[in-house]
Amino acid sequence: MAALTRVSGSVGLISLLNPPVNALSAAVRQGIVDTVRRAVSDPQVKSVVICGQNGVFCGGADIKEFGGHMSGPPLVPIFNTIEAADKPVVAAIEGSALGGGLELALACHYRITQSKARLGLPEVSLGLLPAAGGTQRLPRLIGVPAALDLITTGRHLTGAEALKLGIVDQVTDQNTVEAAVKFALSIVGQSLESRRISTLPCPCPADIDAFFEGVMQRVKKSAHGAIAPVACVQAVQAAATLPFTQGMQREQELMATLFGSGQARALQYCFFSQRVVSKWSSPSGSRWDTSKPKPVTKVGVIGLGTMGRGITVALALAGLSVVAVETQQQQMMAAQHAVSGMLERTARRRGVSLVGDQIRYSVELEAVADVELVIEAVFEDMALKEKLFKQLSTLCKADTLLCSNTSSLDIDHLASQTHSPQLVVGMHFFAPAHVMKLLEVVYGPRSAPQAVATAMELGKRMGKVSVAVGNCSGFVGNRMLMPYVEEASFLVEEGASPEIVDRALEEFGFPMGVFRMSDLSGLDVGWKVRKARGLVEPGQMSRVRQGRRYSPLGDLLCEQGRFGQKTGRGWYLYDSAGSREAQPDPWLQSFLEEYRARQGLVSRRIDSQEVLERCLYALINEGFNILQEGIAAGPEDIDMIYVFGYGFPRHRGGPMFYASQVGLAQVLQRLEHYQQLHPDIPHLRPSSLLRRLVSSGSPRIQRWREIIRMPHSSL
Ligand SMILES: C[C@H](O)[C@H](C)C(=O)SCCNC(=O)CCNC(=O)[C@H](O)C(C)(C)COP(=O)([O-])OP(=O)([O-])OC[C@H]1O[C@@H](n2cnc3c(N)ncnc32)[C@H](O)[C@@H]1OP(=O)([O-])[O-]
């Protein structure tokens, strides 16, 4: 819907009406057609301003329409009509002008924006490209390199940045619509020839072919198999080499290859899933809309190792006051220095000034006595954390929330160390904590809804994708990672090399395969967890531990000090300790041959299909067990955890969405196949929830959440 009113005598004000973001639904598109026609034909209207209701210009095309039959007038002719108008049309940009919203503004003759508005063409993050003239008009307005950067990354700009790039004509901190109406009055009668962007030449770098060849190589490398970024480059190349009309045809052709693709569906699922997981609920019935978060302005961080430093920076960047405690003086000084450096680098990258004076450092635990919430990030040792929670429970205010950054320890056990177990939740950050988007908020059976709501709200303020999950060993992310990592080791025992396994996973879209990732995070990290679980028997080769198959390969490498990058040797060889360039290690090859011979294993050829099926289906199967137990409320929770915390390729939608695309019956059949071959591997035993979903016809993933909540018999 759109409405036209005449203001200031002669300005036709067109308001887009489709809360909350005035998305360009069929009704809004028809509304624009009608209001533009009336404004252009009304002799009393000398100029036009387009704005959005509720302080938001336009969030782009209506993504909710993509899954169904598209009706209503198409955008391209609407925008061409606006550009061709013989009266000046000014876009008044407030809140956000994204995707089709910015393309609408580019079709206008002038753009006035609020300084803190967000502008951009994020279609690539939905598996699409700007298909209403964005790939043809933006390069003509700001040049090919700047346009390519915005279109292939989909990043948002502030109004101030947009002015610097030449996308907008004015930035205001006052009322944007009033500023635009005043501006529209001032330009009546001026020539619009140079204001019709489609008629402008496209400024290009000298050797255009070499330029695009270089860009395409870079984009393909960072895309990890995503197809939309490549199509975005091809569309902008059309702007640089073809007249506008032909360029537009090319844009539409390329969009047709993306729209409805599996990757586009996966990425749009991710868009909506990010919003679904913020609407959390727990099996006890507590929910996002009935649990009010507690106000938090001051947070204590205990333990300033790698994680503690990252968490302190993330809190400071979110504008919170932080009391950072490290009981060792020297370590506290080192942490203070490191945190200042991280804040400076972040400030430089964001082009903002950050001083970090809201951080107070102390070696005294008592320093956090007056904070509203504490996050502990001390060494991953239960005895140490037990002692700390006892101390905090005594010295903090009675209603202070106590949160642990543990990645696997029992949250409810830590809660039982305190006077108020209902005030304890897990806040599991991912390294580096000021960069990684994911936050697992872990609730125990006694965690109060307000404690969960407060942690989720704090995560949102820190710019995190916060996902609420139940308490169990490894929570959701690390629990599912276990079978994935184990399967990879079993495959190496049976004949694969770490390179073969990693290549299959990287071709699938992971930025790093399991063995390269293990070398990066350090083999000793997993070794310590296995020791804590009583699985490690030094020097032992037995492949059965605690009644199930076990691969001692990782332990044997650790016993030789092969911890990965940090020691220059792990599953791969590195030039030196700390180097990141992984090379196949001839020593490991002969070590594996000798190991297989001693274990009586006959090496066999393993192809990437088997690698993907065994590693991913084992992980997915554990995901179904987690849904079955109610540890995660829905598949979206698991998928957002894996996309934002474990590098699962976003254009695959996450492990559970990937399973729904492959087909649950296929996943079940393959798991049954591998379980028959490997009966001693329990995590290949298909989850009963998977069986139930298959037997009920493999419903769409958007229905799983409600199905899981329904009592079994109803299926
Ligand atoms: C032709 C053209 O070339 C192509 C093809 C396109 O144009 S493709 C489309 C390109 N546009 C985008 O990629 C922008 C997507 N939106 C956003 O980035 C953000 O929404 C926002 C604008 C920065 C606001 O953030 P927010 O934090 O204030 O609120 P929210 O919680 O995110 O959103 C509030 C509510 O609005 C819903 N919503 C937001 N944008 C939407 C959109 N474009 N279509 C449909 N629904 C949308 C969202 O799901 C949520 O719903 P619910 O959960 O309440 O039911």
Image (tube, grey):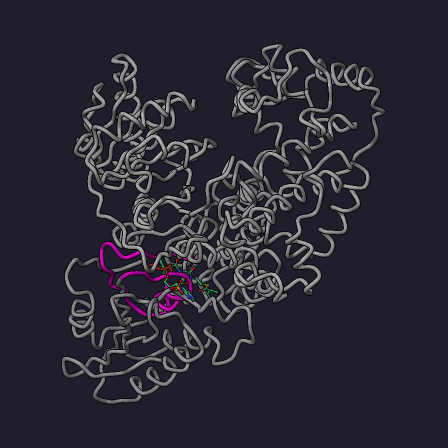
The picture quadrant for ligand 1 comes to bottom left
Which image quarter holds the N terminus? Answer: bottom left
Q: Is residue 271 visible?
A: yes
Tell me if residue 176 comes above or below residue 209 in the rendering: below
The residue nearer to you, when weighing 621 against 491, is 621
The percent position of residue 456, horizontal first and vertical second, equals 35, 47
Which stretch appears magenta? 95-121
- Name the residue: 76% across, 51% down: 669
Looking at the picture, how far across and down is residue 508, in whole percent? 65, 43
Asked whether, in this view, residue 202 is left or right of residue 564, the answer is: left
Q: Is residue 314 left or right of residue 529?
A: left
Residue drawn 71% across and 30% down?
548
- Membership of 118 in magenta stretch: yes
Quarter the C terminus occupies: bottom right
Expressed as whole percent of the image width and height from the top left, the position of residue 42 reads 26, 89
Q: Which residue is at the front of the view, 234 or 536?
A: 536
Tell me if 618 is positioned left or right of 328 in this view: right
Image height of 662 relative to 36, above or below: above
Q: Is residue 380 magenta?
A: no
Q: Residue at x 47, y 66 (%)?
A: 63
Residue sitting at x 23%, y 38%? 400
Nearer to the camera, 600 or 45: 600
Residue 139 visible, this angle: no
State the image coordinates of residue 247 (x, y, percent, origin top left): 53, 64
Residue 527 falls in which quadrant of the image? top right
